[in-house]
Amino acid sequence: MRRYHAPDPWLILVTLFLVAFGLIMVSSASVVESFQVTGSNTYYFVRQLIFALIGLPIWFFLQRWDYHRFKPLATIALLVSLGLLVAVFIPGIGHEAGGSHRWIGAGDLTLQVTEVLKVGLVIYLAYWFDKKGNRVADWYLTFLPFVLLMLVIGGLIIAEPDMGTTAVIAGIAGAMYFAAGADIKHIGIALVGALVAGWGLIKMAPYRAARWLTFLNPASDPLGSSYHINQALIALGSGGLFGLGFGHSRQKFNFLPEASSDSIFAVIGEELGLLGVLFFVILPLAIFVWRGLAVAKNAPDRFGRLLALGVTVWIGWQAVINIGAISGLMPLTGVPLPFISQGGTSLVFAMIGAGILLNISRQTTGERGYEDPFSWWWNIWSRITNTISRAEHPGKRSRR
């Protein structure tokens, strides 16, 4: 019989905060695009709110649905994800936008299949590595099949094309493989291979080469390949320390591409400033990663540890790529900011990941069931109050 306790409260609070804050910022960042597309300033906000309301009961349910039940579904989850990756290229099923094949469906009813893949791959790799046991470090039984799987998945995503999501998937898979006990030499070989493949992909596609050159010199083509990053940097610079005020972004008025989705971090920086970015985006995401790693550390079994780690790396690494790209610290890519960017599929599946993480936190080991991040403050406060009490009542002895 499994032992359950209350889920990590900080994960609950930070997830709800990020979803609510994302809705608030989408309501501001999307007003221009919403009006141009539909004639209503609130279209994309209402759409995002609907997806949040869809994701909320799923998130709540997964907190109570034992994560061990994913084990028999792991292979099916991977096969479904691979099938969806292929389906985006089938006429009548796949949906093309901006020259990319990343969705299935039509009109507003579209599903971004790589978001499904993130959940499916995390579940499958946690199950597969757990099943391998000590054979994770074996060259033939684990390393070669792992590389083959990543080549298939990476090839399908690159064909969409979507190099940013490829980097996210590679980071998730690599972290889980390392944590499962991979041979460090195999990790080194895979890393070198990934770098060589990435360089080759950049050289093969002119637009990727232009993005790389833009990263090295953002002023190289301000009206062409450097336009997006320059507008993002203008937005961040205009915000300064305190920002222009909520709703007062100027760059969202058709200057900044994808203002409410991939580039929403720039709008947040412009409206709320550096302090707003730190307290409303970076700090909550850092807390999510911190608590996620604590859950992984205290999970009751290997499957739970790998599953929690996969979800945590997914959210954290994707956030790093988005923020780094918009800030000019990394080459520009088109990945959403988890929980915050406008995009229904991204929001729902991020909440699914958070729900799985919370279920694992209900089964973690330890006296409290989770590591209280402020327990040391409580210990200090208890000692201070006990010292004061003894000083006021010198004849009173504490019972042992």
Image (cartoon, rainbow, N blue to C red):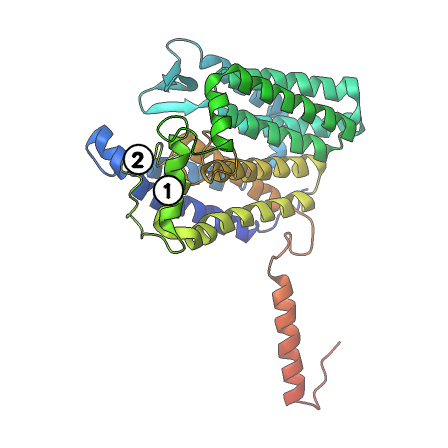
Q: Which residue of the protein is positioned furthest toward the top in this rendering?
A: 91
In this rendering, does residue 79 appear at all? no
Answer with the quarter of the image where residue 311 lies.
Answer: top right
Q: Nearer the viewer, residue 168 or 94?
A: 168
Label 1: few (<14), some or many (≥20) within 10 Å? some
Horizontal side, residue 207 vs residue 110: left or right: right
Answer with the quarter of the image where residue 189 lies.
Answer: top right
Q: CA distance from mark 1 to mark 2?
A: 10 Å
How far from the left and from the top, in percent, is residue 57? 43, 39
Residue at image coords 53%, 14%:
204
Q: Quadrant of the C terminus?
A: bottom right
Q: Secondary structure at mark 2?
A: loop
Tell me, yes or no, whether the two marked residues, 1 and 2, touch with CB atoms within 8 Å.
Answer: yes
Label 1 is placed on what type of residue? Answer: Ile
Is 13 located above or below residue 93 in the figure?
below
Residue at image coords 55%, 25%:
166
Q: Secondary structure at mark 1?
A: helix
How far from the left and from the top, in percent, is residue 73? 59, 24
Residue at image coords 52%, 38%:
329
Which residue is the site of mark 1?
Answer: 234
Residue at image coords 55%, 40%:
316
Answer with the quarter of the image where residue 45 lies.
Answer: top left
Label 2 is placed on what type of residue? Answer: Phe
Horizontal side, residue 186 vs residue 51: left or right: right
Q: Nearer the viewer, residue 159 or 214?
A: 214
Is 182 located above or below residue 294 in the figure?
above
Numbered tag placed on residue 255 in the rendering = 2
Instruction: Compare marks 1 and 2 and give the one earlier in the sequence.
Output: 1
How far from the left and from the top, in percent, is residue 170? 60, 27
In this rendering, does residue 260 appear at all? yes
